[in-house]
Amino acid sequence: MNIIISPIFQNFFSGRIWMGLDFMEIKKELESKYQAKVQVIPLKDIKRSLNDIPEGAVLFYSSVYNPEYLKFIQDSITYISLKRPDIILMPNQHQLNALENKGYQELYKDLIGIEKVHGEYFGDIDDLLSIENSLDYPFVLKKNMGALSSGVQLIKSKNELINFREREKKRSLKERIAFKINKRNSFKKDSNLNPHLDLLEENFQDVFSKRTPVVVQEFIPDLDCDYKILIFGDKYYTFRRETRNNDFRASGSGKFSFIAPPLSVLDYAREINDKFKVPFISIDIGIDKNGECYLFEFQGTAFGPIGVTQSKFHLKYVSNEWIKVEESPNLEKAYAYAIHHFVNSNKKNENP
């Protein structure tokens, strides 16, 4: 097994913005325990080294929250996937695209057949308002970016939706002045293009309007918690998050306990993990009073690692039953295990 570990800025980021992985410890674990051949090549140097990477190698690369550099990473990974489709990307492109992008999560859920919880992605709040008559209140409205429940709220009426829209579209005094100056200069500059005057004003307003991409999810009432499950290979690390006081949101509540979830939650987690087909992932699952399970969000890269770092056990599905394995997990070893398990499992599937 040939593995390329690809940090950025000399670091490998995981979890919160300021946290990181000791990628040299991962390298040591992969080499000593799984006999892998491991190289460290910074992502900025991958393009120049691409022809030297062995056939079928794994590229385990870092992501980052900085939007400008994240775009560079996404472009580079797209290039690698086209230039060297034999390389196994960890995370894959879908996981990477889902980082700080709740809208892409909804699109990808639909692609792989995850129906619950139902959600829709809109490029702007105005796009959502254009179909307001077909909306079922209440519903959960999420801004496309944000963590710890920031930008997530319950919309109970048309008035609340309009108020949200007004807050998002409001310009500061500085923004209003800049808009007027830009408009004046642009109209003057483009006058020699003989523009359609009846369209000029409307188009300018549209082009330079503030846009807020949003996700709408159906509201599941009467939930008092959800379960965050971090999956590394076939190991399931779980903890329960209570909802906030007088609130429907569990993320960011700070009220969590490391307990095994109901078997139906574990079975659902395993079912959707089989659809993702990835070495590691973080998923948020809710269960209603009727025992129905719902996937609220997922992350495949840069997700919070507390489910591993503070856990004392993991769960594993063995011989058609869930077993609890006591341990004191190590995050770097968990990543090394997940990489090895994923590659090894794929080889077995290719050669039954």
Image (cartoon, rainbow, N blue to C red):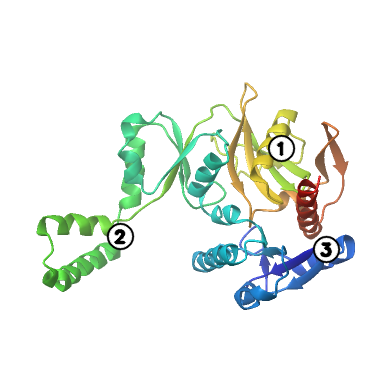
Kindly identify which residue carries mark 3.
30
Residue at disc 3, secondary structure: helix
Residues at marks 3 and 1, CA–CA distance in whole angstroms? 25 Å
- Point out the image quarter for the N terminus: bottom right
In the image, taking residue 248 as reference, residue 40 lies left or right, namely: right
Residue at 77% across, 54% down? 343
Residues at marks 2 and 3, CA–CA distance in whole angstroms? 53 Å
Residues at marks 1 and 2, CA–CA distance in whole angstroms? 48 Å
Where is residue 90 drawn, in percent x and y? 67, 58
Kindly identify which residue carries mark 1.
270
- Assess disc 1: are there few (<14), some (14-19) or many (≥20) residues with their C-alpha within 10 Å of its C-alpha: some
Q: Is residue 160 above or below residue 277?
A: above
Between 58 and 220, the residue placed more toward the observer is 58
Residue 17 appears in which quarter of the rendering? bottom right
Where is residue 232 drawn, in percent x and y? 75, 49
Which amino acid is tagged 1?
Answer: Arg
Kindly identify which residue carries mark 2.
172
Where is residue 31 drawn, in percent x and y? 85, 66
Between 48 and 140, the residue placed more toward the observer is 48
Q: Is residue 193 above or below residue 241?
A: below
- Assess disc 2: are there few (<14), some (14-19) or many (≥20) residues with their C-alpha within 10 Å of its C-alpha: few
Q: Earlier in the sequence, mark 3 or mark 1?
A: 3
Q: What is the number of the mark on residue 320?
A: none
Residue 113 appears in which quarter of the rendering? top right
Please, which residue is most extreme toward the front here?
Answer: 351
Residue at disc 2, secondary structure: loop
Which amino acid is tagged 3?
Answer: Leu
Between 108 and 165, the residue placed more toward the observer is 108
